[in-house]
Image: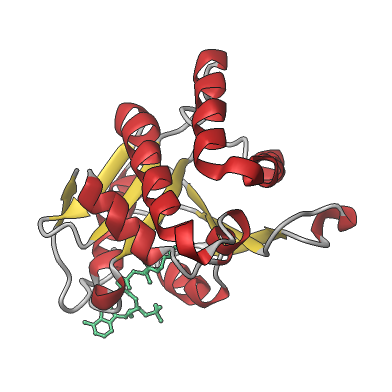
Amino acid sequence: MNALGACLARAFDDDPVSDYLFPNERTRRRRLERYFEWQFTHVFLPKGEAWTTSDLAGVALWMPPRRHVPTVAEAIGQLFTAARILGRHTGRALRLLEQLEAVHPKIMHFYLGTIGTDPPRQGSGIGSALLRVVLDRLDEEAMPAYLESSKEENLSFYHRHGFEVTGEVGEGKGNGRGVGPRIWLMWREPRPPDRPSSAPAPGSHPAQPA
Ligand SMILES: CC(C)(COP(=O)(O)OP(=O)(O)OC[C@H]1O[C@@H](n2cnc3c(N)ncnc32)[C@H](O)[C@@H]1OP(=O)(O)O)[C@@H](O)C(=O)NCCC(=O)NCCS
C-alpha cells in the first residue's frame, strides 16, 4: 500500500483540505501518506472498494451504501488514529467531518471517498478510467453516487461523469456556521439503460481492484 499512499499524498499535496488539516508544509506529505495508508487499510479495503491501475498511478476508494457509518469501537479506534496523525489539528478535522456528515445523503448510494492520480500522470485518462469502471456498474444497478469535491477546478471533471453540484459547505456556509475550506457536494443519478455510457478516454489505463 505504501505506493498508493504516497501517490495519494502527492496528488493531495496542494489540496485546500490538506492545507487546512496539515498546515505545516514540512510535515504535510508524510502525514498525508500516513493518513491515506490508514484510510486505505482500515476503512476502504475492509468495508469498501479500492481501484487502481496496473502501474499504481492513481487510486479511487469507494464505500458501498450504508457501510460508511463506523461501529462505536471502530469510531473510537479511528479517533485515536486520527489524533496520532493530525496532532493538534484533530479538532478541526472532527468539525469538518461533523459538517460533512450532517449533509451526507440518507438515500442509498455509493460514496466516492477519495480519488487521486499521481501529478505527472494527471490529464491522461487515469481518473476517468478509475471512475468509469465503478460508474458503469452503478448505472447497471441503477445506483446513485455521491462525492465531496474540495477543488473548484475538479467540478467540470466530475460533471463530465454525470455528477451535479447539490450544495456547498465550508466557512460561512450553513447559516454562517460552516468551518474550513469550501467543499462542493455532488450527486450522480444513474444513467438510464438506453443511454450509452461515457466514451473511453484517450490514453486510459484499465482500472483494476487493489
Ligand atoms: C481530479 C483527478 C483525480 C482527475 O484525474 P486525472 O487522471 O487527471 O483524470 P483524467 O485524465 O481522466 O481527466 C482529467 C482531464 O484531462 C482530460 N484528459 C483525459 N485524457 C486525456 C488525454 N489523453 N490527453 C489530454 N487530456 C486528457 C480530461 O478530459 C479531463 O478534463 P476535464 O477536467 O476538463 O474533464 C486528478 O486531477 C487528481 O488527482 N487531482 C488531485 C487530487 C484531487 O483533487 N482529487 C479529487 C478531490 S475532490
Tell me the quadrant of the picture where the N terminus can be found: top left
Q: Is 140 situated left or right of 34 in this image?
A: left
Question: Taking the image as drawn, is residue 131 in sight?
Answer: no
Above or below 146: residue 150: below
Picture coordinates of residue 60, whole percent (x, y): 32, 52
Q: Is 106 situated left or right of 115 in this image?
A: right
Picture coordinates of residue 142, whole percent (x, y): 40, 44
- The count of marks equals 0
Tell me the quadrant of the picture where the C terminus can be found: top left
Residue at 19%, 44% in the rendered image: 209
User: Residue pushed farthest front?
Assistant: 26
Q: Is 20 situated left or right of 57 in this image?
A: right
Quarter of the displayed picture in which ligand 1 can be seen:
bottom left
Residue at 15%, 77% in the rendered image: 203
Residue at 36%, 28% in the rendered image: 47
Q: Residue 173 or 200: which is nearer the viewer?
A: 173
Q: Residue 181 or 166: which is nearer the viewer?
A: 181
